[in-house]
Image (cartoon, rainbow, N blue to C red):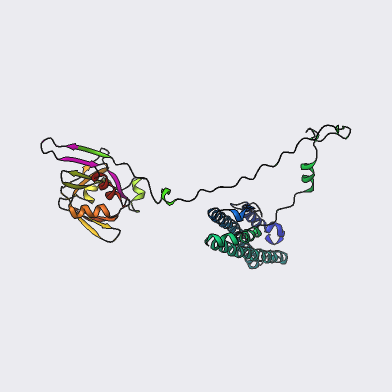
Amino acid sequence: MFSHLSTAARLLPFLILLVTLSIGPGARGQHYDFPKIDSLPATLDTLPDDEIANLALRLASQAADVREVFYRKAQRATLEREVLAEQLAATLADTSASAEDVKVLTQAVRDAQKAEKAALQDLQKADRVLSAVQKMAAQPPRVVRKNLPKAHQQVSALLPPAPERPIAEILESVGVRSDTPSALPPPSASVPSSEPAPPIAPPPPLRRLTFRKYDPVADVMRNPPARACVLTTDTRDEFSGERRREVQREELFRYTSPALRPYLQGREHIICQASVSQNGKHFFLNLTFTISDANAKRTFGSLPKNSIALFKFLNGETLALTNLRADEGRMGDDKIIYLYTGQYLLDAIALKKMQKGLLDKLRIAWATGYEDYEIHQVDLIARQLGCLLKG
């Protein structure tokens, strides 16, 4: 029965697929939206160097957008050619297929191959133009000022010509509608010659674009604002006169094994918060571990006294601190979270290293063994010590 179907009926599934490709993301039939290329100011020679540099970077960004459109077109052309080739192969393998079906599909494959070749050539041309514009934008201002018009012309040449407007649309836009008062007097009306013609207002002056010069000092990514120094404890002992202070705890790192994520329902397995404190002449590092694990006692055991916390700095150096207090762990009210706290003495050597170094990793010795963690806030301890010592 299949052999009696017409060519259009047999190609119906393929035609449906092509329609799906045409209306998919990034495509509206055969139409692609190219970005608009900004025109260059007429006073290009008088613009300062920073504005010239900004214009070049803007042109490079628009060239990248144009290249992205050609990339989508080439992708779609390749996909259409592959679908047609598969359909042709299936038709050739079907002994009941007619010669007309084979002929139609063979021609369709050839047309798709030509379209794919043209799309790939356009993509290669866009790649060359984009590379040239990016290299031009990285040159000194004198070279950029000289080559910017040529680069702008090359990018503009990549765009397809604007479609011509239908003659009816043009006539409608310039014609006089019956429901709109005409700006011109009717033929029978006469304008007295004695009345002076109204003055023609001069066109508004062109507004010159101004660009703020980049200031590295004001860049918050390079120079972030200083964080507030918050002390949770600041007292003086009535008998010894020694001062006791502690900085507010902040998160040092958090860690969840990928294997545990499906079972924790969005919770983090381990969160470590750190704070530094001072008691007279002695300084301490306090680490608080919040563990979301009802079996933490069995998994981690305790945080033994004299256990080691080994810090590794970004420069490769290491520092071993000793825990001064044992902690068996305290269960939270929800019966799931366990809290462990370790207190580590910072002697003169450790204090100096922590003030100047940036942290990388931390190894904690639990009662059941040690674990390594990657530190996220690498400057946290140094910043807290600066806060504590400046007072």
Q: Quadrant of the N terminus?
A: bottom right
Q: Is residue 98 left or right of residue 168?
A: left
Main SS class of the magenta portion in the image: strand
How far across and how far down the image is residue 231, in percent? 25, 39
Location of the C terminus (image quadrant): top left
Seen from the viewer's position, the closer of residues 195 and 289 is 195
Residue extending furthest toward the left? 239
Residue at the farthest right position: 188
245 in magenta: yes
| Vertical arrangement, residue 115 with respect to residue 233, above or below | below
Residue 140 x/y as whole percent: 52, 61
Q: Nearer the viewer, residue 201 or 379?
A: 201
Residue 44 can be seen in this image: yes
Question: Magenta segment range?
Answer: 235-255
Relative depth, front residue between 94 and 129: 129
Query: Would residue 5 be visible to someone looking at this image?
Result: no
Tell whether position 151 is magenta.
Answer: no
Q: How many numbered marks have been drawn onto this rendered protein structure?
A: 0
* Coordinates of residue 308 in the picture (x, y in percent): 19, 55
Q: Position of residue 106 (x, y in %)?
A: 68, 66
In the displayed structure, does residue 391 sit left or right of residue 222? Answer: left
Q: Tell me which residue sits at (51%, 48%) in the image.
A: 212
Q: Nearer the viewer, residue 46 or 19?
A: 46
Tell me: 239 left or right of 291.
Answer: left
